Amino acid sequence: MSNSYGHIFKITTFGESHGEAIGVILDGCPAGLPIDREAIQQDLDRRKPGQSKITTQRKEEDKFQILSGVFEGNATGTPLTIVIANKDARSKDYSHIADKYRPSHADFTYQSKYGIRDYRGGGRSSARETAARVAAGSIAKQFLSTKGVSVQAYVSQVGKIKLEVDHTQLDLNAGEDNLVRCPEPKVAQDMIDLIDQTRKNKDTIGGVVSCVIKGVPPGLGEPVFDKLHAELAKAMMGINAVKGFEYGSGFAGVEMNGSSHNDEFYVENDKVKTRTNYSGGIQGGISNGQDIYFRVAFKPVATIMKDQQSIDQSGGKTTVKGKGRHDPCVVPRAVPIVEAMAALVIADFYLINKAIKL
Amino acid sequence: MSNSYGHIFKITTFGESHGEAIGVILDGCPAGLPIDREAIQQDLDRRKPGQSKITTQRKEEDKFQILSGVFEGNATGTPLTIVIANKDARSKDYSHIADKYRPSHADFTYQSKYGIRDYRGGGRSSARETAARVAAGSIAKQFLSTKGVSVQAYVSQVGKIKLEVDHTQLDLNAGEDNLVRCPEPKVAQDMIDLIDQTRKNKDTIGGVVSCVIKGVPPGLGEPVFDKLHAELAKAMMGINAVKGFEYGSGFAGVEMNGSSHNDEFYVENDKVKTRTNYSGGIQGGISNGQDIYFRVAFKPVATIMKDQQSIDQSGGKTTVKGKGRHDPCVVPRAVPIVEAMAALVIADFYLINKAIKL
Amino acid sequence: MSNSYGHIFKITTFGESHGEAIGVILDGCPAGLPIDREAIQQDLDRRKPGQSKITTQRKEEDKFQILSGVFEGNATGTPLTIVIANKDARSKDYSHIADKYRPSHADFTYQSKYGIRDYRGGGRSSARETAARVAAGSIAKQFLSTKGVSVQAYVSQVGKIKLEVDHTQLDLNAGEDNLVRCPEPKVAQDMIDLIDQTRKNKDTIGGVVSCVIKGVPPGLGEPVFDKLHAELAKAMMGINAVKGFEYGSGFAGVEMNGSSHNDEFYVENDKVKTRTNYSGGIQGGISNGQDIYFRVAFKPVATIMKDQQSIDQSGGKTTVKGKGRHDPCVVPRAVPIVEAMAALVIADFYLINKAIKL
Amino acid sequence: MSNSYGHIFKITTFGESHGEAIGVILDGCPAGLPIDREAIQQDLDRRKPGQSKITTQRKEEDKFQILSGVFEGNATGTPLTIVIANKDARSKDYSHIADKYRPSHADFTYQSKYGIRDYRGGGRSSARETAARVAAGSIAKQFLSTKGVSVQAYVSQVGKIKLEVDHTQLDLNAGEDNLVRCPEPKVAQDMIDLIDQTRKNKDTIGGVVSCVIKGVPPGLGEPVFDKLHAELAKAMMGINAVKGFEYGSGFAGVEMNGSSHNDEFYVENDKVKTRTNYSGGIQGGISNGQDIYFRVAFKPVATIMKDQQSIDQSGGKTTVKGKGRHDPCVVPRAVPIVEAMAALVIADFYLINKAIKL
């Protein structure tokens, strides 16, 4: 019963993979915001299936329709509803798992929790739901850009292939120049090759998406529980297949001493800055004006093209056939999803921070 | 304005490091639960300062008082309020930073956000606030134990010293046998030595706390946004000094293939189990009945006993003196905090999961 | 930004009067509940415009589509989305008020708050939005009927014509036998005549809807702020045109003495009962097992068929023409809306009350 | 589990009538607000028991202590905690009802819901809890006064004695000049006499509190569910003994025609005004800049000084003795409670309305 996210800038998503449609209600979009439909479509296209040889071949146009909340091109402050039809659902591809539990999928847990599940395409647990987030997140990015805030994600690891370069040394726009969305062309090619090889092996592989948020003013985040990085963590961990989150120095910071980890303050051009940024732009749960950056770990996709042993709903042994259309690696398509959720978090905190002022 | 956590089993904490008191209201504790005051005190003692040579020497008894919500030893279902007085606050130790921003502390961000801050002992941003969480979390553990659920955390890394053993191979109770709360005595001693040496160097060091939750029935967690691991992540990231969270295979899972990462289902004694547990006991955001386990990364404590360059409130250069009483490494005292927040998350989802049944 | 209602059994509505569609997401419907589509349509038909001579002549079929959350006839526990298209919107009827503020409408306040408004048909402030509530409320009633709870509303006053009979003396089903939904045929006829005469006078008139909820077990309601009657009040006051709410003895109880107002407890057939029921089935904010009943006051509809003086957006004097298609009295169509909101409140409290048990 | 109220400006109250203390955490008070302790005490004194011959004779000083959230006289933006000790609790006065259900009290419903209850003084269901609301509400009024908003309540009816004068004709400050808090001295005296006579009759009587909020700018309130009057209704209905709420024309408006009920807009001194104000300052759920006014109905106090028939916990017949110290009429002391809850609602909406702006 938790299909809503956010406090003021709040979304509620709906829809199953093979149902009529998926969609989202964005409640709390500031009135008067011009809604750029092309930008929404662009973000949806970055996430949509079938976009390249290293993604699933399911073909969805992911054209959207706005049912409410926009008048003469601008948000009205009332619920903004976006619907995306499901068109290329091949539900019969799933009849073979109607009463089987696919390993490391949500089949068993949904059945345990609800006593019923729409098994077609994974139903509600399908990552198809994230298209709705991308649409709403695109509007969040549009709102944030009016405040000088940018949100950009990219692939920084696939399997063991890591982009070792720091985000400050990268042209983040270059991520969109290749299929895998890694801004370093040579590393990108290695990643693409690895994914392609993995696909040919009928297997899947994990990856990491990094994200950088620039231009966030000091003051966003609501201690002690809704710290900025705590909400970012929740937002990211809520994306399908995510297993880990770290910001700033992250797990590597564990091995450092305070004397080298501490970020020294200084003033330049009347702006407070820090010489290093191990804090990842957040201190005490509140943005400090420096770049916010974090990394999100995605596991290998659970659906593989090999047969696997499992059980059925009555507990009997069974074999799950390797078939259907799936991604060999989820991170290229996850980039706009990470951006969307990050933008939703920042937009929400931006509005909340205005509210609490005297 | 976000000092509350949880939906049904919900806490609100209050208090500054050097104010009158800190405390917590637990709203939603099921009526009739016997409240074990000794167990609460025990958990507070595990967190309290001054407990050993490797923790801060601030002396707080952390005796608590229950102001409401308990009648004749049992919870009444009304708000259960616990207050812990501040006794050994030495506020004058902080007068030197009244208008300075300590590096990698929350001084600058609180000042930016609120335009005012109680600088004494870090005010609200002090980890002292977590004592309130520990008290409430202890009650959550008491509730969960009536359901057969246990929550146990331990230190698995300090600096570069890692406990490489899997939690299934450990006696988790052994963690309490030594100062650093690592269940492997030899590794524990190395950790203690490292912390002690770091302290002598007037420096600090990071660490990792691991946590294992056993006995959680299938079905807990509320997709798509309040996935069980997403709430655990938020709860952990909301603890002071935390920089990263991973569950199950975590960041290491990124390098695996789906064929080896997938957890095969089987049935034993009429219970559904998995042969491996890379899923960390959670699939699709819902518990699957296997052990839930996760790791939490803590940065090195920001307060060091060395002088540091920084700025003051008017932007001028200044030196922050290294003084006061602080932990050289936060993880030994963080163990009960991690348990508390984990228990609060599980208790809340336990109650929610009952609600949504037909 | 508050287009959601409820905690566990939670709805979010969307849509403007003359937009593409209106609709609702019901998040938290217990999985496994059979969804009776005919019953939903029946409730929508009770609310729909053009149903009789005493309602607006706008013709909307109000046929609905379920986009998600139902699989093979049963709720899946995932968001249940219902969409109702707008078909007979005559937006050009509203071009004359595009920049005028109709008296006692929401034109001025929406413009003040949002700086923009969809003036067509009142946009989001139109009572057309309540169709979405009726659809979701119908499912709430279906859920409640599995628990033996019934929710029935009826018209008890139009202008000065009052139904003086107590609800315990009425056949509540008889309300559906006439156009005005008053269960006493003679009073009903007087009401119909009054509404018809008012319509001919190009004027409008107010009314009262009474509601009775039977079969609610003791224990529903969450003090101290979410008392059962407090949520009922909020739910009712959130319906368009409502000006007052009272339950049990209500405003009349003010004039009574405690000695006659107190409801004496007794036991009959092992059930606790009260000899009188001035408490309206709720004591201390919690249901006591007796009938819950309350009254909701509706003002006369603001749109009248006469010209009125007003101002335009630039503050100049203007005349608002009396035209369009509108109800001369809102209460006959408000009956299913009152039932819907009441059912949503009770269903939500029912689920919450399960959650908080040990 | 619902002891919190508000979204941004949010309170959580705790405490039982005869426990250690009652209190409140105010989370979301804008940082920098000067906290006027005398004003808080003044409001508490207006509510406190034993203030005159027409109130209960329980003697509580209701001195408060601020445990957190204020630094050097100003709110810090962190949780502001206020505690009020219980001093004159005579719990033995209640031993006779430990296992009895007092008529029209919350004894039976609390026992049904929670299976346990602190029977002493009514426990959590006691109106003593409202002192915590008054303290927080006093701060809300302090915040609102910085925005030019005033909140003033007064007694407008006791039994059948009504103050028939419109609020626009009254000197609202005069309410504090007499024991019953009715701004019209002659009517006040009649009310006092009636209450005194009722007390001598060992009985109780109901009353109405009216409230006027001036200076609210257009734009407050969040349709469609959190309409300004809907939240006011919920806030008022959550006060002990309240049975009804109406705003603007209220129940009387039911009998009016639209042509006379509609409030004509005009402009004076560049401000939009309405010639009449049947809307009660709220249109479409949003404030329109005119005075907001509403009426709250209180039932006669359930505790009377006469013996009453009832049942005990095992269902047996029993007599409830008329004893203890109680109010013969609740409205004089309810005046500051109504103001407090109203101020909390307005303050919350004020902050939310800032948040949603572009």
Image (spheres, coloured by chain):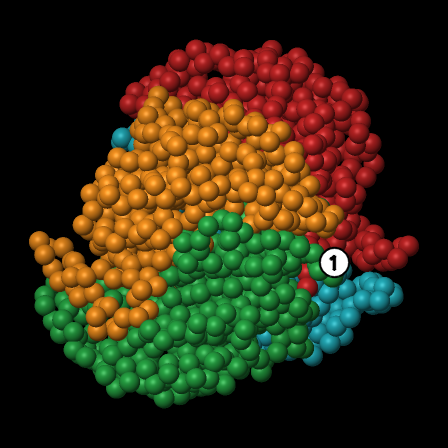
Chain colours: A cyan, B red, C green, D orange
Work out whether residue B100 or residue D43 is closer to the camera in this orientation and state it. D43
The image quarter in which residue C92 lies: bottom left
Q: List x then y, in percent, for residue D74.
A: 34, 27
Task: State whether residue B209 appears in this view.
Answer: no
Q: Quadrant of residue A66?
A: bottom left
Kind of residue at badge 1: Asp
The furthest residue to the right: B269
Check disc 1 and report its element: helix, strand or loop.
loop
On the image, the x and y values in percent for residue B13 come to: 53, 33
Mark 1 belongs to which subunit?
C
Along the line of sight, which residue is nearer the eye, B64 or D310? D310
Q: Residue at x 27, y 30 (%)?
A: A270
Q: Position of residue A197 (x, y in %)?
A: 67, 61
Of D325 and A171, which appears nearest the observer?
D325
x%, y% of residue A233? Answer: 55, 45
Relative horizontal placement of residue D291, taking residue D318 as reference (left or right):
left
Q: Is residue D287 above or below residue D144?
A: below
- Horizontal side of residue B200 vs B293, given as left or right: left
Closest to the observer, B97 or C138: C138
- Work out whether residue C250 can be spotted: yes
Horizontal placement of D307 versus A228: left or right? right
Question: Which residue is at 67% across, 14% downward?
Answer: B52
Q: Residue at x 85, y 55 (%)?
A: B271
Where does label 1 land, which residue?
A: C270
Residue depicted at 49% across the width and 32% down the height: D23
Label 1: how many Cα within 10 Å (few below 14, some 14–19, many 20+): few
Q: Indicate whether D234 appears above or below A117.
A: above
